[in-house]
Amino acid sequence: MWGVTRLPWQPVHSGLVVGELKGEDAWYPLITPLSLLKRLVILGPREARASIACSLIQRCWPLGVRYLVLDTARLYRALLRHPKAKLYRLGYDTSFNPFRAEESWSDEELHSYAQLVSKYFAFCFNLTRLHASLLCRALARLYQEKPDPSAIEVLQAVEGEATPIARGQTLAEEVKLTLTSLLQGYAATCLLSQGPEPPLLDELGIVELSRLATYEVKAFIQACLAAKCLISGLQPTLVIEDAHALFPRRRGLEAPELLSLDLTLLAPSQATLSEHVLGEASLTLEATSSQGGWVRAKVSINGERLEARLEASSLEDLSDSDADALMEERLGRRPEKLKPVKARPLTTLEELFPRDDVRREVYAVLSYLRDNYSTFRALFELMNLPSDVARKALIKLHRHKVIAQSEVGGAKVVTLTDFGRLVLEEYESVVGGGNGG
């Protein structure tokens, strides 16, 4: 039940007081059952909507509601005033490998996670279902060996799934290029470090993604954290800031399975958020203005749109050093800052051949062709690789004009192109000659 003008006598114990509702001649308590907050959408300017969310969390958390806040803009540190709240700063003191599955998962759960991660990867980085299918095959193969492949190992596995046809090679190159873009800056530190990962079962956990560079990376990490909750059967209420990056209006609903979770979704306006998500919302709060400790808002429920004022929380921002001291008190240890991962730019040869074993054989072939010419058959036999892998490697070298075919004495031979010499020299100057990487 809601406390509306025709029910001003409604008792507070029937729900949670979240603000006041405007009646014809007065303001009345705005009361909602907790069940309506399981599918909540909050719209408006970022600080206004965050202050509403913080106020609601502070009221619901003591009632036993667990929260996992996925904060993109460092707006929720005020929640640390609660004695059991924990802060996890991705790329700073916490890592997260979105490709790592849980060791306890069954084969079916591993396959489901591979499908979800691949789909979210393609969606968040504006790729296609074909890209997702290729990545899913690579992850499924890796999960047969171990549940925690690194991003580098995923990159190498994608190479192994590429088909020799031009379209298959192009898809693999596009997936690899996107994966490579993740291995820069704080994103690389987040994905590649061996630091602790944020637990999903804290009473009140705040995962900060503000150090990650782009909306796309943040949305992908948010989606993978949500997928882990979904596969593991965990039921914290996920607070997803900037949810329009994950559920945008411009495209169809790409992650319908996430709507089975308890969600608080925050976005700038209805125009930015998926119509399906808005239709599924039990309650929508749209901030219109702020004054003192109140936010004026429009409340939408069951087709009605009512004027209300909601209590807003102060968004005090603790410094990192103050947050470190607070976490030391609660964890019994001071959060350890992750060491930056210094990932040098990849050479052309490394981009073309991420797998060490393949690159080593390709390097040997190119080194031989520096002062000699050969035939495709002879090069094929020279490579100490499975026949299908060797064939793909030679096709790729020819397609990228690293090697070329020409006639010498009436016979067709393979030679190293001028571009191929530059590729070889670049690789040797960075990695060093003689070892093939």
Image: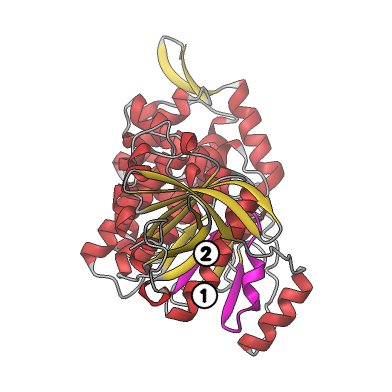
Q: Which quadrant of the figure contains the N terminus?
A: bottom left
Q: Nearer the viewer, residue 176 or 309?
A: 309
From the viewer's perspective, tell me whether residue 136 is left or right of residue 422.
left
Instruction: Estimate the x, y position of residue 306 in percent, counting from the top left.
Output: 45, 47
- The dot on residue 69 is 2
Distance from Cα at disc 2 to Cα at disc 1: 8 Å
Neighbour tally class for label 1: few under 14, some 14-19, many 20 plus, Cα within 10 Å: many
Instruction: Estimate the x, y position of residue 166 in percent, counting from the top left.
Output: 36, 25
The amino acid sitting under disc 2 is Val
Can residue 180 be seen from the camera position used here?
Answer: no
Q: Would you say residue 75 sits in the magenta stretch?
A: yes
Task: Look at the numbered disc 1 and give the secondary structure of its residue.
Answer: strand
Q: Would you say residue 292 sits in the magenta stretch?
A: no
From the viewer's perspective, is residue 214 above or below residue 324? Answer: above
User: Which residues make up the magenta segment?
Assistant: 65-88
Q: Residue 292's quadrant in the figure?
A: bottom right
Instruction: Estimate the x, y position of residue 176 in percent, counting from the top left.
Output: 48, 41
> Which residue is found at the position 66% from the left and 69% from the top?
78
Q: Nearer the viewer, residue 272 or 329?
A: 272
> Which residue is found at the position 61% from the left and 84% from the top?
83
Location of mark 1 (residue): 204
Tags 2 and 1 touching, CB below 8 Å: yes
From the viewer's perspective, is residue 61 above or below residue 115? Answer: below
From the viewer's perspective, is residue 401 above or below residue 268? Answer: above
Q: Nearer the viewer, residue 32 or 225?
A: 32
The amino acid sitting under disc 1 is Leu
Q: Nearer the viewer, residue 186 or 275?
A: 275
